[in-house]
Image (cartoon, rainbow, N blue to C red):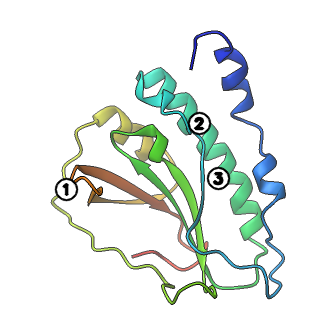
Amino acid sequence: MRKRGLRRYYRNLNKTEALERIDFSGSPDSWFDLYHLHIDNFGLGNKSWKARKQHLNALFRLADKIEEKLACYPKDFQYWIQIDEMDSSEDAIYVHSENPNSNNFPIKLDIDGQTECKSLTLLDYLKQKNYYMVKIRLSDAKGNESITFFLYKAGLGLEII
């Protein structure tokens, strides 16, 4: 993305049209199969901590709005925020429930307590949030490993652990 238009880009991070398209009614057609929303589709948060923080701030503002909607959702669900230590474009908010696509509810993680974080700035930022946090090591299709943080709130859906 060119430098021209960045101010408008960052201002638009706070718009939440995507929320209007999500069905939180609890009707038979209201379900989530690892549904997720990304904020940083271009990976601009990878350029600097200042850029990453702006994307994370927008992600947590969107999470607050989703949490309000989920407070009234009548079905069992899981909700978490997933933050990749090295790639801002992978950061996302997830909602998951029983669904007709697969029998993968609830999600369970294999947590490794030995996983060490390289980005202390990111870790300090996440510790300030009002979430429980676990971190695990994930590998992509090419075999590249990264640390991923899973943030969740007790009492808001089934725990992901």
- The kind of residue tagged 1 is Thr
| Residue at the far front in the pictured view | 142
Q: Which residue is mark 3?
A: 63
Residue 1 lies, with reference to residue 13, above or below; the image says above
What kind of element bears circle 2? helix
Quadrant of the image occupied by residue 114: bottom left
* Viewer-closest of 152 and 90: 90
What residue is at 77 percent from the left and 38 percent from the top?
A: 15
- The kind of residue tagged 2 is Asn
State which tag comes first along the sequence, 2 or 3. 2
State which tag comes first along the sequence, 3 or 1. 3
* Viewer-closest of 148 and 116: 148
Q: Which residue is mark 1?
A: 115
Q: Look at the image and tell me in which quarter the N terminus lies.
A: top right
Q: Which residue is mark 2?
A: 57
For residue 135, which numbered disc appears in the image?
Answer: none
- The kind of residue tagged 3 is Ala
Quadrant of the image occupied by residue 60: top right
- On the image, the x and y values in percent for residue 77 come to 61, 79
- On the image, the x and y values in percent for residue 116 come to 19, 49
